[in-house]
Amino acid sequence: MAEIRFYNGDDIPLELHKVRIVQKLDLVPVERRAEAINEAGFNTFLLKNKDIFLDMLTDSGVNAMSDRQLAAMMVADDSYAGSATFTRLTDKLKEIFDTDYFLPAHQGRAAENIIAMTFVKEGSIIPMNYHFTTTKAHITRLGGFVEELVIDEGIKLTSTHPFKGNFDLEKLETLFEKNGDKIPFVRIETGTNLIGGQPVSLENMEAVADIVHRHGKLVVMDASLLQDNLYFIKTREEQAKDLTLREITHRISKKMDIIYFSARKLGFARGGGIAIHDKSLYLKMRELVPMFEGFLTYGGMSVREMEAMAVGLDETMDMDVVSQGPLFIKYMTDELLMLGVPVVTPAGGLGCHLDASRFLSHVRQEEYPAGALAAAVYIAGGIRGMERGTISEQREADGSEHLASVELLRLALPRRVFTLSQVKYAVDRIKWLFDHRELIGGLRFVEEPSSLRFFFGRLEPVSDWPEKLVEAFRKDFKDSL
């Protein structure tokens, strides 16, 4: 990837693509936005797309496909068994990960389910650098426990550490010494989703694998956010600066026993799967695919998506492609930082992350500051983000609230979707909101599922703060939307 400098000194990311298809957006008035978030139970997941201007909820399944991906979808082989499409996808995974076996699944959490059902039992302990919501739910559902072993720097939201997603190796060794017999595998998440999309270094991944293999256990990698992680390894890690993305990927995959991913993130398509080196591990999991997903050559996926996935995986090995997400995220993060808005640093992958605990320091954690901030950002700008804090956790067995380590609002930047002016609009509205942050109050549940409550739980404000926010917006912006 060549570094591009502007003659006038501007430090802005440059789109390395041209837009060929557009989709019209609507920005509804602030009064309608307040009504819409109330109808959605102050849960951004329950908003209707017609009321959303910039959808920064997630990058999952909403990244822009390339022309090559769209073209590939036209040659899909929809045979139920023995599909040539499956062969092309398997060959591409072999090329990238050097794995001999592949089990398709309809998305990443389906792959998690297969892995958990195969290896997790009552009392199992699964160490990981940091949990993801569905990963933890699959493990606890089967009676297992998650042990988070991210380095202390990982949950320091303001930091200069380049790899805040790294494992604490000493803690991992200690856990094996105390409970090694209860550990079936160790999970590495490349790009720790819930703490700001923070990457893991190549050195750390290799060291973790060496420890795990010395104890005779498996290493499982969640590669859903691998593309951003590859960019950070290439640009931040001295030992990798002269390696290609393919060489870095081979180094990583050589140390992994099982690699699973959501293609809604990795590969810019809709699907997922499990890539495996060893035949015996493949056979252990194989029967669960036709039982829960579909036949072994499609696994619940559309063959058109599989063709697009194969091309998307190939494009993930191109620095001009993988750099776009991190560069735009860094720009947005840096702009907010200059304006005094509290954000997670250094900028990671997936999206820009607002630190709700500092943004709304007057809102108690029991009143869900990250959820309240998500609702407020939507009211202020029609921007939908995702709460990544206590709402994303689940209650303890005794019914008490499990307070999250961090309270974040994630503003995802799907790849090749938003323009620079749209990012600048988001920065502007967030700055306005920060200057009026004292108006924002907390939330409380009125409808609370027992697990994954952030998906479909409903809340209400603890006061009339949404109405006050609308009044302040209308005063400052007059007739503007």
Image: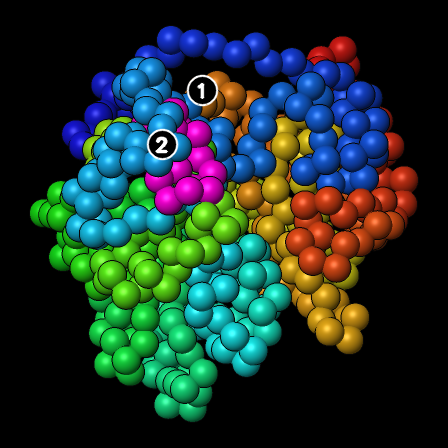
Q: Position of residue 458 (x, y in %)?
A: 80, 45
Question: Image check: 391 left or right of 65?
Answer: right
- Residue beneath the point at 30% across and 18% down: 75
Q: Hey, what amino acid is under mark 2? A: Met
Mark 2, secondary structure of its residue: helix
Q: Is residue 311 above or below residue 66?
A: below
Instruction: Please report contact status of discs 2 and 1: CB closer than 8 Å, yes or no.
Output: no
Quadrant position of the C terminus in the picture: top right
Residue drawn at (60%, 45%) of the image:
409
Q: Residues within 10 Å of mark 2 (few under 14, many from 20)?
A: many
Relative side of 448 to 145, left or right:
right
Q: What sort of colour scheme is used for the picture?
A: rainbow
User: To which residue does mark 1 refer?
Assistant: 419
Which image quarter is the N terminus in? top left
Residue 149 relative to residue 467: left or right: left
Chain part drawn in magenta: 294-309
Q: Quadrant of residue 354?
A: top right
Residue extending farthest bottom: 178
Question: Mark 2 against mark 1, which lies toward the viewer?
Answer: 2
Q: Is residue 422 visible from the viewing direction of this image?
A: yes
Mark 1 secondary-structure assignment = loop
* Magenta run includes residue 462: no
77 relative to 396 in the view: left or right: left
Q: Residue at x 58, y 24 (%)?
A: 54
Q: What residue did someone put label 2 on?
A: 306
* Residue 176 position in % (x across, y down): 37, 85
95 or 160, which lies in front?
A: 95
Reply above or below: 87 against 371: above
What x and y, as percent, mark residue 316? 27, 36
The residues bearing labels 2 and 1 have C-alpha atoms spaced at a distance of: 28 Å
The image quarter containing residue 475 is top right
